[in-house]
Amino acid sequence: MIDEEALLDALNSTPVVDGRPQDRWADDAVLQQWAREHDGADDAQAIEWLRTARDVLQVATRGPVPEADLRRILAGVQQVPEVGGATLRWRLHGPPERMLAVQLVLTWYDVQARRPGRLRPCGNDECRLFHLDRSRANTARWCSMKTCGNRLKARRHQERARHKPAT
């Protein structure tokens, strides 16, 4: 199943390491393992749908939502209610190769609805990671204060010191 942490893991699978963009999901075996860990299909079609969903959701989190791409991922999928005594569950039905990608999209929409504006890209333009702001004030700007936050603050300080007029 896809929860908020799995969504962040998927969105953050293309980090910048030592100044070079990486794609942790480029290796089929790595993505197949991720799919199995989240109870999804791990065949070639399923992992391609996962990559597609991840890429679309990265775009959607950074800016305008690519509705046509999301509709393509969600095409032919239904949620059907199942009653079992005093419980009601919604079961997803659709093409098996797309189900984990669909869950990823549904979780993204759920986060957007429950935590509006809190899932966002890191404030460091050189970073490609995303974070879910869980602060009370909704003011977190960086994926990590230790890395991106301190780097940017140090850079700004150096810029101010460099341009400070001599007294």
Image (spheres, rainbow, N blue to C red):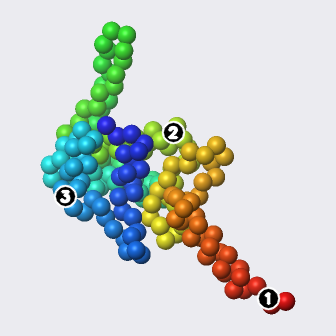
- Secondary structure category for the residue under label 3: helix
Q: Residues within 10 Å of mark 3 (few under 14, many from 20)?
A: some
Residue 78, quarter of picture: top left
Residue 140, quarter of picture: bottom right
The answer to whether 158 appears left or right of 133 in the picture is: right
Does residue 151 lie above or below 38 as drawn? below
Q: Residues within 10 Å of mark 2 (few under 14, many from 20)?
A: few
Depth check: give the residue in front, 156 or 72.
156
Task: In the displayed orientation, state which residue is furthest to the left.
Answer: 43
Amino acid at circle 1: Pro
- Secondary structure category for the residue under label 1: loop
- Mark nearer the N terminus (2 vs 3): 3
| Disc 3 versus disc 1: nearer the observer | 1
Q: Residues within 10 Å of mark 1 (few under 14, many from 20)?
A: few
In the rendered image, residue 15, in percent from the top left (x then y), is placed at 39, 64
In the rendered image, residue 93, in percent from the top left (x then y), is placed at 25, 32
Q: How far is mark 2 from mark 1, CA to CA?
A: 49 Å
Residue corresponding to mark 1: 165
Residue corresponding to mark 2: 113
- Mark nearer the N terminus (3 vs 1): 3
Q: Name the residue at 18% across, 47% down.
A: 42
Q: Name the residue at 50% across, 43% down.
A: 112
Q: Name the residue at 54% across, 62% down.
A: 146
- The answer to whether any part of residue 69 appears in the image is no
**Mark carried by residue 28:** 3
The answer to whether 136 appears left or right of 50 in the picture is: right
